[in-house]
Amino acid sequence: MALETPNHTQTVAGWAAYDSSGKIAPYIFKRRENGVNDVTIQVMYCGICHTDLHHVKDDWGITMYPVVPGHEITGVITKVGSNVKNFKLGDRVGVGCLAASCLECEFCKNSQENYCDQIQFTYNGIFWDGSITYGGYSEMLVADHRYVVHVPDNLPMDAAAPLLCAGITVFSPMKDCQLLESPGKKVGIVGLGGLGHVAVKMAKAFGHQVTVISTSPSKENEAKQRLGADYFLVSTDAKQMQRGKRTLDVILDTVPAKHSLGPILELLKVNGTLVVVGAPDRPIELPSFPLIFGKRAVKGSMTGGMKETQEMMDVCGKHNITCDVELIKPDKINQALDRLARNDVRYRFVIDIAGTSKL
Ligand code: NAP
Ligand code: ZN
């Protein structure tokens, strides 16, 4: 589709999956010219989110191949459209999940573009002009400036990249649950992966007691020593889960696979809230007893609005929160995706797109 759109004249080198085998190979494609509201970004780094894995394998049945994944993008501005006032050449910027929204609905007007029902994503979306969007596994990106944020000067571009999706996806529900302004809460994080490890760092920086709920006993030491978690529960150990009953105020569930919310809900105090951000392809189990016996609530949350994303970047700048990353060259994307599928990453792969790091 993109190739048929008249102003798609810029040739870009990227990496795409061509079918549901999920194998990534080089892909040359076209991007639109820089419009009046656009900025052009030389991509430096792009994180590999589990959502990329869901897309390349067509887990959710919505993938339009070839798909160029990537929505944890950092880079430098090389062109600025005439309507753009808040960015200039050379600025260090980030792009996350959002490429476009209607700009007119109550959510867009209220800085919650992420809940606009016309939302289009950075990849596997359909832009205003009818072209399919291609993400950050590519050397250059043209983005509407309304969906671009500044990266604080003190944050390294590689370790900041995953903040654009993993970071905002856990920051937004934490803010929604008043965790930014009321320290001393007991917060649980289910799944210590890309999203989970940033959530631990943020919850600690905001002054909470943090419990990690994990399927991986091998992560306990690093969760406590490196990431600062206070407690660690192995979710497959019924005794440990029993000891954790009714201890937590808020839990974020980042698990990407089918599981039951029952044992997790039991960890909440009466009136506690469980926020689901993980997106398994099959329905998660929600037994009614732990819900009704504890007057507990389950809700979802999807990425964050753009104002909130900038706020999150600034908060991370202030607290020096970055992600623990394993940098790879683009020719190692397939190995990285395989390892991500096997839960073998501490804690985010980031692709060195521009080749600026010593690897
Ligand atoms: P990730 O790096 O793979 O981390 C997920 C963690 O969940 C793993 O490290 C593992 O932690 C645990 N886990 C994995 N498989 C499991 C299983 N079968 N049963 C129980 N636990 C399991 O993934 P991520 O990038 O953080 O993304 C997590 C999910 O969030 C994905 O589904 C992704 O699509 C979704 N997501 C949603 C949004 C949103 O806007 N809502 C945004 C971004 C991503 P332990 O080893 O500690 O158990
Ligand atoms: Zn993501």
Image: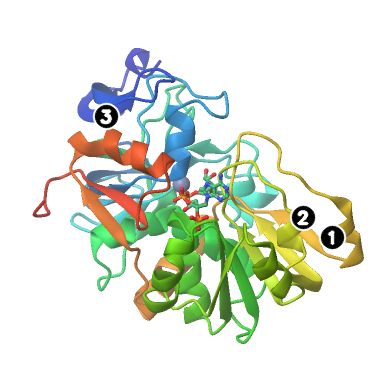
Circles 3 and 2: CB atoms closer than 8 Å: no
- Kindly state the secondary structure of the residue where label 1 is placed: helix
Q: Is residue 285 left or right of residue 139?
A: right
- Please determine whether, in this image, residue 85 is positioned above or below residue 342: below
Q: Which residue is mark 3?
A: 15
Q: Earlier in the sequence, mark 1 or mark 3?
A: 3
Q: Earlier in the sequence, mark 3 or mark 2?
A: 3
Quadrant occupied by the N terminus? top left
Q: Which residue is mark 2?
A: 262
Picture coordinates of residue 271 (x, y %)?
Answer: 83, 71
Q: Which mark is residue 290?
A: 1
Q: Earlier in the sequence, mark 2 or mark 1?
A: 2
Picture coordinates of residue 307 (x, y %)?
Answer: 50, 61
- Kindly state the secondary structure of the residue where label 2 is placed: helix
Relative to the observer, which residue lies in front, 177 or 245? 245
**Residue 37 can be seen in this image:** no
Look at 47% across and 68% down and name the residue there. 311
Whole-Å distance between the Cαs marked 2 and 1?
6 Å
- Report the amino acid beneath label 1: Pro
- Please determine whether, in this image, residue 191 is positioned above or below residue 35: below
Q: Is residue 109 left or right of residue 349?
A: right
